């Protein structure tokens, strides 16, 4: 292969509110690479195949002086998120040419890494599309699985309220809860998403933009579990309708990522109802990874867990895709197919 463009997507500026494609992130084609001659220099050369667009990326588009649980993106450097790539050439003893690696990738078509530590070699014996490994079989699927395994205490007759139900986290939780025979109430932001979550088993599926979450929960609750969380308003309604000893498994609050957060007014319900509030970031629950890889890809390949993907081809679509996830225009996992194998 001759010298080719090594396209990237760079972080350019902190958004004021929602991300702006072309300003807060920039598609850059100034680099070139000789794929046949580039030496990995003791490491390995990776060709990026797929990259995920996740809601939390907005959180990393902040000023570097603001501390948080994940580092801020660096201005002028590629964005970073979960991806799958194939090793083209390796000089490292624990990585071989042809291996498919999963982990945090720079948004760049080709890159050299010296450290295999942060990557997982995927065996993919189910022959699933690589895109599933950044979705239902990757970080967001792990968020649903690990959070459920760590915190959920399902009992016969329990009612679960799932927000952002059409996303990978929410849709996986809906299906895990249904497998345990629970009643699932789930909210989403469009009629198309209502159809999707009904099709995967939600007993009560509603559009929180047109129906009152509080009214629905008062009618269909009280609720014993709440996962994940998309907005302060839905958390407030969930607290208001929680049963005694309810468990709230909280992993996100997307409504506050781009706008002033909504401040929940009824936190007194936590002690009045004896609610257990469990917040988590999935990277702190890696003890569940082995069980996840042993069970979930098989369930996905057998159709026992369904998923939805919103696929864009080419790094030039990254900026718009990031915005679309923040405003809810995605349905399911947004995946960038960077290049064919
Ligand atoms: N703690 C962790 O380790 C961890 C890991 C992964 C994900 N998460 C969190 O889990 C949640 C779901 O993640 P996902 O990857 O499955 O994303 P997702 O559901 O595919 O995408 C985010 C969805 O959030 C909804 N949304 C956007 N703005 C909203 C608003 N103002 N109010 C209510 N809902 C809004 C939209 O769906 P609608 O059209 O239905 O509103 C949008 O499609 C996110 O909050 C994410 O940050 C946490």
Image (cartoon, grey):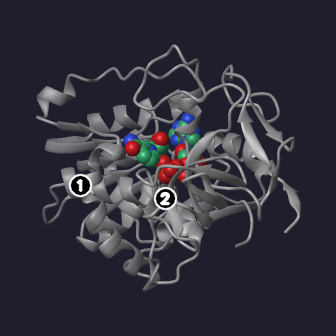
Quadrant of the frame with the C terminus = bottom right
Q: Nearer the viewer, residue 42 or 44?
A: 42
Is the residue marked by circle 1 packed among few (<14), some (14-19), or many (20+) residues within 10 Å? few
Please indicate, yes or no, whether residue 331 appears anywhere in the rendered image. Answer: no
Please indicate, yes or no, whether residue 221 appears anywhere in the rendered image. Answer: yes
61 with respect to 168 (left or right): right
Q: Nearer the viewer, residue 296 or 268?
A: 296
The residue lying at 60 percent from left, 51 percent from top is 41
The residue lying at 59 percent from left, 33 percent from top is 58
Tell me how far mark 2 sits from mark 1, CA to CA.
Answer: 21 Å
Task: Examine the rendered structure and indicate whether residue 112 appears above or below residue 311.
Answer: above
Residue 306 percent coordinates (x, y): 47, 74
Q: Which residue is mark 2?
A: 168
Quadrant of the frame with the N terminus = bottom right
Residue at the limit of the structure toward the top, as seen here: 65
Residue 45 percent coordinates (x, y): 63, 58
SS class, disc 1: helix
Residue 179 percent coordinates (x, y): 28, 73
SS class, disc 2: helix
Residue 143 percent coordinates (x, y): 37, 52
Q: Which residue is mark 1?
A: 287
Earlier sequence position, callout 2 versus callout 1? 2
Looking at the rendered structure, the number of numbered marks drawn on it comes to: 2
Is the residue marked by circle 2 packed among few (<14), some (14-19), or many (20+) residues within 10 Å? many
């Amino acid at each position: 292969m001759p010298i080719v463009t090594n396209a990237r997507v760079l972080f350019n500026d902190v958004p004021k509110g929602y991300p702006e494609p072309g300003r807060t992130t920039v598609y850059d084609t100034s680099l070139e690479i000789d794929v046949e001659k580039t030496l990995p220099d003791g490491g390995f050369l990776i060709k990026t195949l797929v990259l995920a667009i996740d809601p939390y990326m907005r959180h990393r588009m902040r000023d570097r002086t603001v501390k948080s649980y994940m580092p801020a993106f660096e201005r002028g450097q590629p964005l970073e998120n979960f991806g799958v790539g194939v090793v083209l050439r390796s000089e490292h003893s624990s990585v071989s040419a042809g291996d498919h690696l999963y982990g945090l990738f720079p948004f760049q078509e080709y890159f050299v890494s010296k450290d295999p530590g942060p990557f997982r070699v995927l065996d993919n014996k189910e022959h699933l599309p690589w895109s599933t490994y950044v979705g239902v079989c990757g970080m967001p699927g792990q968020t649903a699985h690990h959070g459920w395994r760590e915190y959920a205490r399902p009992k016969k007759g329990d009612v679960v309220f799932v927000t952002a139900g059409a996303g990978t986290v929410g849709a996986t939780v809906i299906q895990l809860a249904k497998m345990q025979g629970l009643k699932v109430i789930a909210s989403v932001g469009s009629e198309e998403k209502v159809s999707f979550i009904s099709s995967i088993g939600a007993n009560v599926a509603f559009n929180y933009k047109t129906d009152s979450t509080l009214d629905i929960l008062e009618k269909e609750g009280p609720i014993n579990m709440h996962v994940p969380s998309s907005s302060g308003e839905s958390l407030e309604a969930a607290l208001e309708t929680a049963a005694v000893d309810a468990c709230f498994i909280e992993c996100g609050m997307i409504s506050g990522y781009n706008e002033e957060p909504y401040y929940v007014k009824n936190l007194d319900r936590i002690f009045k109802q004896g609610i257990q509030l469990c917040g988590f970031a999935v990277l702190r629950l890696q003890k569940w990874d082995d069980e996840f890889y042993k069970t979930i890809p098989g369930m996905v390949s057998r159709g026992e867990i369904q998923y939805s993907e919103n696929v864009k081809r080419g790094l030039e679509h990254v900026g718009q895709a990031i915005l679309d996830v923040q405003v809810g225009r995605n349905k399911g996992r947004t995946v960038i197919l960077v290049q064919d194998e």
